[in-house]
Amino acid sequence: MSRIHSLFRNLLQRERVERELDDDLRVYRQMLIEEKRASGLSEEDAIRQTSLEIGPLQAVKENVWEARMGWTLETIWRDVRYSIRSLRRAPGFTAAAIVILSLGIGANTAVFSLFSAVLLRPLPYPGENRIVAIWEKRLREDSARSPVSVADFLDWRNLTRNFSSIALYESSRQTITSGNQVELAPAARVTAGFFEALGTRPLLGRTFRVADENPGGHRVAILSYHAWRLRFGGDRNIIGRSVTVGGEPADVVGVLPEGFRYPFAASCEFFEPIRFTADQRRFRGIHPYDAIGRLKDSATIEQARAEMEVISKQLESQYPESNTGHVANLVPLRQELTGRMQSTLAMLMGAVFLLILIACANVASLLLARASGRKRETALRLALGCDRMRLLAQSLVESSVLAIVGAAGGIALAIWGLAMLRSTYFERLAFFAVPGLDRIDLDWRALAFTLGSVLLSTALFGSSSAVSAWRLALDQPLRSGGRGAGSGDSQRFRSALVIAQVALALLLLVGTGLLSKSFLQLMSVKLGFQTEHRTTAILTLPALQYRTLQQAAKFYDSVIDRVTSMPGVKSAAITDILPLSGNDNRAGAELQGRDPKPGERIRMHPRLATAGYLETMGIPVRAGRVFSASDAANQRHVAVISEIAAKRYWPNENALGKRFRFTVEGAPWLEVVGVVGSVHNRAPDREPTPDVYLPFRENQLRYVPTRATLVVKSSLDASALGHDIRQAVTSIDHSVSVAGIRPLDSFVDDATMARRFILVLVTLFAAVAVVLAASGLYGLLSFVVGQRTGEIGVRMALGASRSQILREVLAHGVRLAGAGILIGLCASLALARLMSTLLFGVLPNDPFVLGAITCILLGVAVLATCVPAWRASRVEPLTALRTD
Amino acid sequence: MAELLKGTLDLLILRTLSLGPNHGLGIARRIGQVTRGELDVKPGSLFPALYRLEERGWLTSMPDDSAAHPRVKLYKLTQAGRKQIAVETASWSRIAEAMARAIKATS
């Protein structure tokens, strides 16, 4: 009989094996009796002697069982069944422990899944670690990640020996026409080598070539798998077919494979080649694009860095005017995509880790309370010869059973939580536009992590209860009648657990407090424009029909005329760069009559706008006037600048009447006719930029602004206006697309979404933590009061007043909470600095936040103490003494 | 009536069976005889040992039809059991020698 066979037989056919053993023993006994009879004993004596010789049958059988295969497994299984039985007999305790553990493990599993999807899972690009983002580091401006100029890029591409491909890209939105429907879809413009850099081969056709970058060439486009299936029915003959993108026909030259994801936006339906204009090839001062590259297999990133530095130096000496202090900066793709999220995710991981510690401390004190309640049972078992090791093992098994059931609940909670997060935040959170994040689920990493949390929590709370069981065993409390002696130790331990819970909860509360204050500060930032009662819409003109600035400007003017006359509309305006939209333009400038100071670079952010823009947006005029239609008639080149620009470039002077021009060939001098309020363009938590407002006709960067945003000031909301706006625009030109109709304040929502996301989560965790800490305190004091009922009764009988007793219990609770708060405050001073990158307008040791949180926690502690204190003060001396 | 060291009993049982198949009581009596009554094997240690040895594959059991009791089990040494005797004998001799030396050295 093999061992495995024996194992199965012993475990599964227990009854049969048992019967066999019974038979063996019976036969043995029979033979022994016969033997004794044969030696001349009487029947009665033979039986008596035999029984003495064999001893208790049950003991023999148990010895046999212990010697057999699978005995350990069998024991564990028996312990598990025993634990389940005893847990079912205490449903209140069991439910509480499981809910608490589920919360702790669930929060950990959910946040870890996020963490793992963003930071641990490989990006879906082969040879991911060979892909780098290439930025321009500008030593003078203290900027490490500036976009790249086309002329520099072309030189890099010619000179580098360490990259197998290098490419520019730009994420955008572009109209695509299917049938007679024009839709705005996420798109990107990229150069040749982009897909090669990401290691992607097309499913059909080809990728872009260098020839496609020529503006004179044939227009081409590449479709994503998604767009190909949904818009073109997965037609395998699509290559060479003409589609209409941006209002113009382009030939489809390729279709990307299903698994391909565009790394720099949440999605991308199609790609167009970047077509370099003659100006772009010439002027190094215009930096429109971002760049990536793939290292050759033979090259290391250090080699590539060294090479690019040499090339940058070379360009610097060749073109000192534009390239002084510009060095190519290589950033690994993973860091590029996920770097910003590291601090947020690390903070969330820290928060859930604190939460699971609190949960474990809480369950540990529940277990201790239960162990005290079962002291007599335990003592009895010890007295009856139960092994201490067995008792210890059993308490660990019970803890594991709780942890495993808790983990099952936790996984369910995590799945639900992730679904909630996904539907609430991911769609709108640019922050989460990481390739692969749409695949957040519980993968093996997350499950391994959950298992880890189960082991951790079992070890944490299980060991404490096991230790108390051990102590109990040493105490042999049967003698002391289950009261007194043994409880002092376990009570001290439970006090320590409560203090720890309060301290951990305080840490979470401090995090929440700091984030809340940051958020309030953020919301109170004066953006510089009015967001209420404004509706926006994105207009996209077909570039083939609108080839000049004049044509576009004329169209925008007629849109304003039409929209302004709509019922309920107070005013309307169009701009190419809406604040908080993520778009921006920036260009170098020179001031008339003043040379830049050494090291100073004068840069302005030009915004094109129709005449009524500043008024429609509610941007106040500080000095001078806004531009008007008569400026164009008088052939005057005028500009309106923001306060920041005026202060920065004409400090201690009146900027009105001063002249400046952009450093673009042929740009005219512009006269400052007005100074207006500054606007937080990029984000509420970033400084305003030095802006220049110009009429569309005066576009200094010379491109034709075929995409612009219409802003309508009206008491009607976006959904009521949407239809009329669409009608008004398409009645002028039906080939223009109108998309993204939404209220202006939704941009503010989006800009603060990342902070809201982390704030909501951390607040949730802190709330759970406070409830757990409070319940821990409540549980301990109730227990203590219960234990001391007799003593309280005696004291009352001896004349102690009720209020004295009440005060005493309250003081006990406050003492415990106070110790926890003190420890927590010390820890928070050390830890809060770690989250300083997530804060805005508040220091990590903000006294108001710390003070407020101390008060809240103390208040909660007093509340939690009230009930047991009141109960203690209501003790009737007579009843108490009688029950003793 | 000395207590038996674990492993000692295994060796004694295997040795006993190397003389020929036997049943439980027979094995116990035989061990009693060869040790001249020094070692008295009780069922509390005999049966666990028999089951353990059988599970290891060193002996097998079969019903003995010829015996007076219909359900009596006859234990028989297997090939592996026979090899195990050599292994256990060697290790036991080593222990016995070491013990003897230790006792001599300390007395």
Image (cartoon, coloured by chain):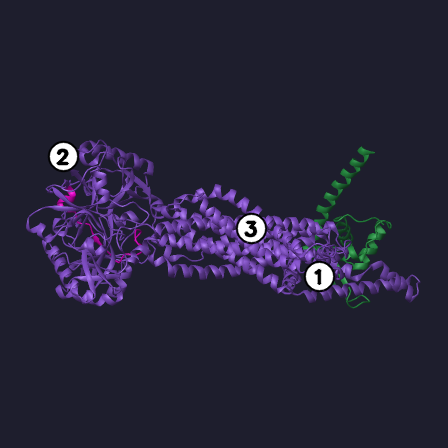
Chain colours: A purple, B green
The C terminus of chain A, quarter of image: bottom right
Number of numbered discs on residues: 3
Label 1 CA crowd tier, 10 Å (few <14, some 14–19, many 20+): some
Q: Does the magenta stretch mainly form a helix, a strand or a loop?
A: loop
| Mark 2 or mark 1: whose residue is earlier in sequence | 2
Residue appearing at x 56%, y 60% in the figure: A98
The residue that label 3 is drawn on is A501
Reading the image, the residue beneath label 1 is A876
Q: Which tag is nearer the camera, tag 3 or tag 1?
A: 1
The residue singled out by tag 2 in the image is A593
Amino acid type for the residue under numbered disc 1: Glu
Question: In which quadrant will I find the N terminus of chain A?
Answer: bottom right
Going by the numbered disc 3, the residue's amino acid type is: Gln
Tell me which amino acid carries mark 2: Gly
Question: Which corner quadrant of the image does residue A651 belong to?
Answer: top left
Whether residues under marks 3 and 1 lie with C-beta atoms below 8 angstroms apart, the answer is no
